[in-house]
Amino acid sequence: MTFFPKSDKLEHVCYDIRGPVHQEALRLEEEGNKILKLNIGNTAAFGFEAPDEVLVDIMRNIATSQGYCDSKGLYSARKAIVQYYQSKGIMGATVNDVYIGNGASELITMSMQALLNNDDEVLVPMPDYPLWTAAVTLAGGKAVHYLCDEEQDWFPSIEDIKSKVTPRTKAIVIINPNNPTGAVYSKELLEDIVEVARQNDLLIFADEIYDKITYDDAVHYHIAALAPDLLTITLNGLSKAYRVCGFRQGWMILNGPKARAKGYIEGLDMIASMRLCANVPMQHAIQTALGGYQSINEFIVPGGRLYDQRERAYQLLNDIPGVSCVKPKGALYMFPKIDIERFNIYDDEKMVLDLLRQEKVLLVHGRGFNWHKPDHFRLVFLPHIQTLDDALSKFARFLKNYRQ
Ligand code: PLP
């Protein structure tokens, strides 16, 4: 009898946000348990709705969107993306430099498939949004993790980045605002990163999907604007700020000396055409979303849901003995530290699983974000305050007597 194992290519590929713990949560739900989910950045699941105008635009265009479109996406949507970046001072791109995908996720995978030869290295943050490490690994490359330093507001350590560059390093990934830490990088830090990229001839991937979700005095800077002389690929999409992750709309835009990337661009075009095109009706939302009124702004100021929920989750977490957390300045997540000596934790996935089974609260373990120790976890602060109160008081109760 023939057995069909997964391919060797997948041996080291991980995506734990939807991994075994998530599967266990689904099983418990099927048994009739109510799970308090603090695990996934799916805004719609927590009652955040899309702006009406976005929905109207899709409905108006659905009848005329039955065919495939250009592999890079609808012209009008790509034009709107170019104009959006022009309005931010990023002038180097044309409509041909924009690729629309079924979410930024698809483009992350495509961008690595087109770039990497076996054993090429890409600098990826630690902790990271784990799709980046997975996409590099699936493409045959090696994700080399650089440290984001909790003691420095989770800013990347420039020294660590420099120490990890080798002759095989092709690119560096920057996630800003960051998932899972919530850090929003200063202009000075980004300039330092650009300088390392310049010195070592690295391509910069800027994952800026949370660029409009910042709190307090945090200002988001687009790294492409700080590096016009370097090749940058900026990724973004409608999933977060426009609350329509189910519509699967993301884009990437290339800036800088594109003549030097002729071969890579041919590769990207080929991979884009292999999957024909992204979902067409949903692309009509892009122009509307990017222009005009930005309803996300209501959520990120005092009195707005995201702001208030962040405040509450931050306070409740830091009140739990043995747990501490840096306050996020952007995005939808926190990456708190847990005192592993106190609870004798050696396996963070087990801790998260024990919590799930005991209290029916779902978090994601820190090593799922390629963090190097079992001493962190991630939660989303998308749930309403009552749910956060409920979930975090259960977490506190769980930890009180927890020993691994
Ligand atoms: N990048 C980051 C940092 C994310 O957090 C996510 C989703 O959570 C994505 C990319 C993928 O977004 P999408 O595929 O929905 O556009």
Image (cartoon, rainbow, N blue to C red):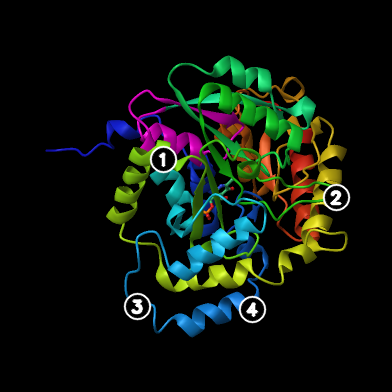
Query: Which residue is labeled 1 in the image?
Result: 259
Q: Residue 66 carries which label?
A: 3
Q: Nearer the viewer, residue 211 or 227?
A: 227
Residue 120 locus on image (x, y percent): 39, 25
Disc 4 and disc 3 in contact, CB within 8 angstroms: no
- Label 3 neighbour load within 10 Å: few <14, some 14-19, many 20+: few
Circle 3: element type: loop
* 4 or 2: tag closer to the N-terminus: 4
For disc 3, does the CB lie below 8 Å from ligand 1? no
**Amino acid beneath label 4:** Asp
Q: Is residue 177 toward the left or the right of residue 228 in the image? A: right
Disc 2 and disc 3 in contact, CB within 8 angstroms: no
Disc 2 and disc 1 in contact, CB within 8 angstroms: no
* 4 or 3: tag closer to the N-terminus: 4
Disc 4 and disc 1 in contact, CB within 8 angstroms: no
**Amino acid beneath label 2:** Asp
Residue 270 locus on image (x, y percent): 29, 49
Q: Which corner quadrant of the image does residue 135 belong to? A: top left
